Amino acid sequence: MSETDTIEQETVEVSAVEELINQITDGDLNKAEGSFQSIVQDKMADALEAQRIATAQAIFNDADVDVEDDSDITDEEIEDVVDQVMDEDEEILAALDDEDTE
């Protein structure tokens, strides 16, 4: 193996953060700004993609379960829940009216 091949193999790619640090220490702040913005954009894109995946999994993996569970609910159970909510709302409104009269 020649000396040139050895030098080429030893060359290691510098990460974006290392490049940013090198630019800052060298005083090349214009390039450092561009590198920083690029790093932040990459991080935001990765986070957004991860959130998209999580949301899609939540929607599509749970969709079948929810449909099956909803079919077990009777009309009477729905009416009971609606009645409870209405009663709670009436109690809150009555309490607010009592506070207004005081």
Image (spheres, grey):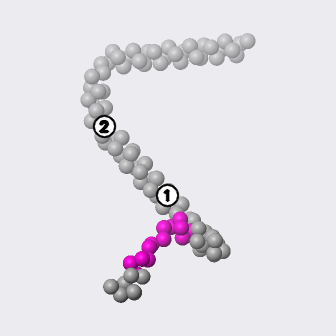
21 vs 46, left or right, is right
Looking at the rendering, in which quadrant would you find the C terminus? Answer: top right
Report x, y in % for residue 48. Answer: 45, 53
97 vs 39, left or right, is right
Q: Nearer the viewer, residue 19 or 83?
A: 19
Residue 42 in the image: above or below residue 7: above
The boundaries of the magenta stretch are 8-20
Question: What number is the disc on residue 95?
Answer: none
Report x, y in % for residue 69. Answer: 29, 27
Answer few, some or many: residues within 10 Å of disc 1's Cα (few below 14, many 20 plus, some between 14 and 19): few
Q: Nearer the viewer, residue 25 or 68?
A: 25
Residue at image location 26% in from the left, 29% down from the top: 68
Report x, y in % for residue 31. Answer: 59, 74
Residue 57 in the image: above or below residue 5: above
Residue 50 in the image: above or below residue 72: below
Type of amino acid under label 2: Ala
Give the residue number, with chain letter if any, for mark 1: 43
Residue at image location 33% in from the left, 85% down from the top: 1
Question: What number is the disc on residue 63?
Answer: 2
Q: Nearer the viewer, residue 73 or 65?
A: 65
Residue at image location 48% in from the left, 17% down from the top: 86
Type of amino acid under label 1: Lys
Q: How many marks?
A: 2
| Secondary element type, mark 2 | helix
Circle nearer the viewer, 2 or 1: 1
Does residue 35 appear in this view? no
33 vs 72, left or right, is right
Report x, y in % for residue 61. Answer: 30, 40
